Image (tube, coloured by chain):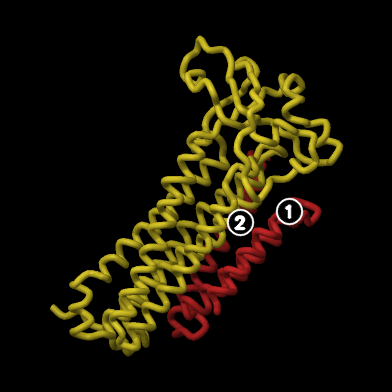
């Protein structure tokens, strides 16, 4: 059976069907991500001063991933334009670059950024014990500057068995630079280039800790929403890559030979989805990495 | 061209996040303003919304309306007597 209106426009809508379809789908996607973003805003605005983590993500890597996605958005337009010019070789090249960009994005996210967080430790100090850890927290200094207090100490956990073994009474942490030098004004705001944990070791007694965990979704509302939204976004990137791969297969070449405009329209629709994924990332990046 | 502009504004977003605009709220507003501008570029040029059929606009007006409603719920929650 021949599917109608893949190329020619329906008289009542003035559009070929897939165009209407993808926009309806994108409209539902807007609601999906919109719900998560509004949840994020709600959690964020309701967090007490000092309860929302800052500077725990790798900004240069996030910036690079943003650039990669934008570049792939450009190449997918070029691939579509190549099809419109009936240049299959060029189309294949641009499509391959797009797929490569998408895969790179995913690899960076899943093989580098996430695992780095899974190995990043944070201990929230009990209200009563904040004074005791003042040398690491520098809250008097922050109060003078009119900034939010620090309630968590982060760094690299040396004795990982402390997480599970109740007989281990303390956490040994190689401190992140902020906590090694908390009263330094340069440490008041996060830096662009992330610095590794210092060799200054802090011992934090478990009895002083309200809650301690790696930077997993359970760490905080911040990481819960970070992993949810970047995870869902990553799934979309993966979906886009799979669709683009299909468009490189012989099946798609056959469609091109049969009617090049048909494949061009398919690429256009997949491209619309890809731009949407790019668009979501444009909001994710500043909200989670920068603010 | 558009890609270049987008890359440039990504750099601008990153740079601006290290500038203190007084309050946290001001910084959030500036970052979201730049992001919205970039999103507008993507939608208008890459997704060629600047020259699209009327039906698509109709779909998007509905979407915009409901998304606005969704964010408005968050706003409503601030006046929830149980929550406060």
> Could you tell me which residue is drawn at 26 percent across and 85 percent down?
A260
Left or right of A284, for residue A24 = left
Q: Disc 2 sits on a residue from what chain? A: A
Left or right of A259, for residue A216 = right
Report how far apart the C-alphas of labels 1 and 2 lie in the structure: 13 Å
Q: Disc 1 sits on a residue from what chain? A: B
Query: Tag on residue A286?
Result: 2
Left or right of A152, for residue A75 = left
Query: Please, what secondary structure does the residue beneath circle 2 have?
Result: helix
Please name the color used to draw chain A.
yellow
Q: Is residue A107 above or below residue B57?
A: above
Q: Which residue lies furthest to the right in this view?
A: A144
Q: In this view, does A252 lie above or below B11?
A: below
Camera-nearest residue between B29 and B82: B29
The image quadrant that residue A152 belongs to is top right
Camera-nearest residue between B67 and A234: A234
Query: Tag on residue A111?
Result: none
Circle 1 residue? B25
Left or right of A49, for residue B2 = left
């Amino acid at each position: 059976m021949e599917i109608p209106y893949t190329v020619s426009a329906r008289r009542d809508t003035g559009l070929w069907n897939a165009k209407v379809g993808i926009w309806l789908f994108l409209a539902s996607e807007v609601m999906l991500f919109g719900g998560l973003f509004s949840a994020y805003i709600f959690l964020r605005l309701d967090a007490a001063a000092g309860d929302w983590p800052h500077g725990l993500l790798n900004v240069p890597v996030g910036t690079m991933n943003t650039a990669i996605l934008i570049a792939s958005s450009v190449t997918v337009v070029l691939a579509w334009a190549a099809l419109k010019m009936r240049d299959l070789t060029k189309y294949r090249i641009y499509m391959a670059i797009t797929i490569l960009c998408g895969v790179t994005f995913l690899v960076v996210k899943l093989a580098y950024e996430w695992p780095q967080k899974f190995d990043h430790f944070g201990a929230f100090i009990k209200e009563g014990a904040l004074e005791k850890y003042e040398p690491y927290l520098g809250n008097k200094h922050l109060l003078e500057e009119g900034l939010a207090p620090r309630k968590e100490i982060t760094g690299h956990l040396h004795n990982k068995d402390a997480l599970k073994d109740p007989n281990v009474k303390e956490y040994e942490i190689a401190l992140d630079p902020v906590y090694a030098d908390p009263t330094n004004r340069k440490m008041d705001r996060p830096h662009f280039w992330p610095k590794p944990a210092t060799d200054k070791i802090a011992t934090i007694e478990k009895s002083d800790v309200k809650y301690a965990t790696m930077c997993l979704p359970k760490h905080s509302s911040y990481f819960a929403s970070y992993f949810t939204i970047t995870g869902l976004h990553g799934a979309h990137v993966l979906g886009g890559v799979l669709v683009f791969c299909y468009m490189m297969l012989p099946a798609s070449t056959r469609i091109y030979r049969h009617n090049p405009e048909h494949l061009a329209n398919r690429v256009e629709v997949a491209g619309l989805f890809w731009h949407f994924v790019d668009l979501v990332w444009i909001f994710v990046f500043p909200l989670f990495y920068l603010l | 061209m558009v890609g270049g502009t987008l890359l440039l504004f990504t750099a601008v977003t990153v740079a601006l996040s290290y500038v203190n605009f007084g309050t946290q709220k001001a910084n959030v507003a500036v970052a979201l303003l730049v992001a919205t501008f970039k999103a507008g570029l993507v939608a208008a040029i890459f997704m060629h919304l600047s020259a699209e059929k009327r039906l698509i606009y109709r779909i998007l007006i509905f979407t915009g309306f409901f998304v606005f409603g969704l964010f408005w719920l968050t706003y409503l929650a601030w006046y929830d007597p149980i929550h406060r």
